[in-house]
Image: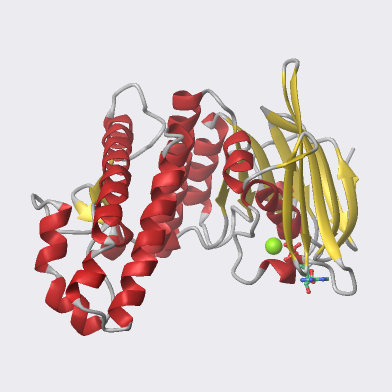
Amino acid sequence: MALTALRVEHFRCLNAVDFQPDPNLNLITGVNATGKTSLLESIFVLSRGRSFRAGRASELIQYEADALTVYAELSSGTDTHRLGAEIARAGRRLHVDGQTAALGDVAALLPVQVIDPEIHLLIQGGPEQRRRFLDWGVFHVEPRFLDSWRRYRKALRQRNAALRRQDRREAVMAWDEELINAGELVDAWREAFNDQFHALLSSKSFDILPFELKCSYLRGWKTGQSLPDALADSWERDRATQATQVGPHRADLRFEAGGHALRHHVSRGQQKLLAGALVIAQTHFVVEANQREVVLLVDDPAAELDREHRERLFELFRAVPAQLFVAALELDELPWGTAGKRFHVEHGELAPLI
Ligand SMILES: Nc1ncnc2c1ncn2[C@@H]1O[C@H](COP(=O)(O)OP(=O)(O)O)[C@@H](O)[C@H]1O
Ligand SMILES: [Mg+2]
């Protein structure tokens, strides 16, 4: 599935943009603050109902406008879907083929990944970024994951509320059964996904990475212990901190290259290259696993990279089985020559470049 038509209205500085993307490669250029990132963001919003940049969804609505809209056509052979996202100040509505749709349904139909100038945070940032990265992959290969993860988070919120109220231990533990049932499923799917992902990273047939990468899963409680035992052991700490200290909400990934944790041992440029490689590897994995094409949004890929790192990253893009949308200041920063479709943004409008 690829995006074959896109219409974006009142999205930040983009007033009305309407175009037919190329199914493989789209290059978007323009000077600063013309709306390149906004255009990528609009595709992300269509899939996930929110932006990849920080801030509230209502900040995406153009000043003075009441609502933003993003419409798209998604096609593969004769199979076509119409997707839409409308964000008004009062709330959001997503639809597929004219019917109101849940977030999970749209995200499943249109898997979108991003490599932007903040991508090094996948390595350098907090565990939440890595959990999101992991869960994106798990969600796309295991349709039951989302429901269990939501159930887990709901039980966790209730349990933490009981801890904050300093309820009796029995009242706090009343949430444990649901927490454990959903939490064990979430954990098992994450672990299974990471085992396979890790196997792909190190397999001989997957040789697009010019370096050896390892990805270990840290489940969020002590190795070898069951979740019920970990919760029981954590009781005093939970009570003192008024929050549940162990469980899948504390999971993390540990990335290594050449036996070193990436977090401590590589420069910013290397982190960007490695984080980009991880996203691209995961894209390969998800495409292989569920046979659904991924849309990969790439913002300003040349930023902060020297020539060697840039070329290595571009080499990875060449092999990725995704519909690419790449934004950059100038076409000559990019390695694609005259391939794909090229667009230019200026004053919130988009025009094809011939
Ligand atoms: N809600 C909004 N309404 C109108 N303009 C906005 C809104 N939010 C941000 N902007 C403006 O839109 C532009 C955003 O551009 P951006 O997509 O980041 O550009 P680029 O990636 O090309 O540098 C900036 O000039 C910013 O001030
Ligand atoms: Mg930008």
Residue at 45% across, 45% down: 147
- Asked if 49 appears above or below 194 in the picture, the reply is below
Residue 352 appears anywhere in the view: no
> Residue 127's x, y, as percent?
35, 63
Task: Judge from the rendering whether residue 108 lies leftward or rightward of residue 352; answer left or right.
Answer: left
- Asked if 99 appears above or below 124 in the picture, the reply is above
Image quadrant holding the N terminus, namely top right
- Quadrant of ligand 1: it is bottom right
Residue at 69% across, 30% down: 2
- Tell me the colour scheme of the image: secondary structure
Given the current orientation, which residue lies at the most extreme top position? 78
Image quadrant holding the C terminus, namely top right
Say which of 195 and 104 sits in front: 104
Residue at 43% across, 31% down: 285
Say which of 75 and 285 sits in front: 75
> Residue 87's x, y, as percent?
76, 60
Image quarter of residue 176: bottom left
> Residue 49's x, y, as percent?
65, 54
Task: Judge from the rendering whether residue 264 lies leftward or rightward of residue 287; answer left or right.
Answer: left
Residue at 58% across, 60% down: 303
Say which of 139 and 180 sits in front: 180
- Asked if 85 appears above or below 26 in the picture, the reply is below
Task: Judge from the rendering whether residue 258 lies leftward or rightward of residue 282; answer left or right.
Answer: left
Image quarter of residue 20: top right
Residue 69 appears anywhere in the view: yes
> Residue 223's x, y, as percent?
11, 52
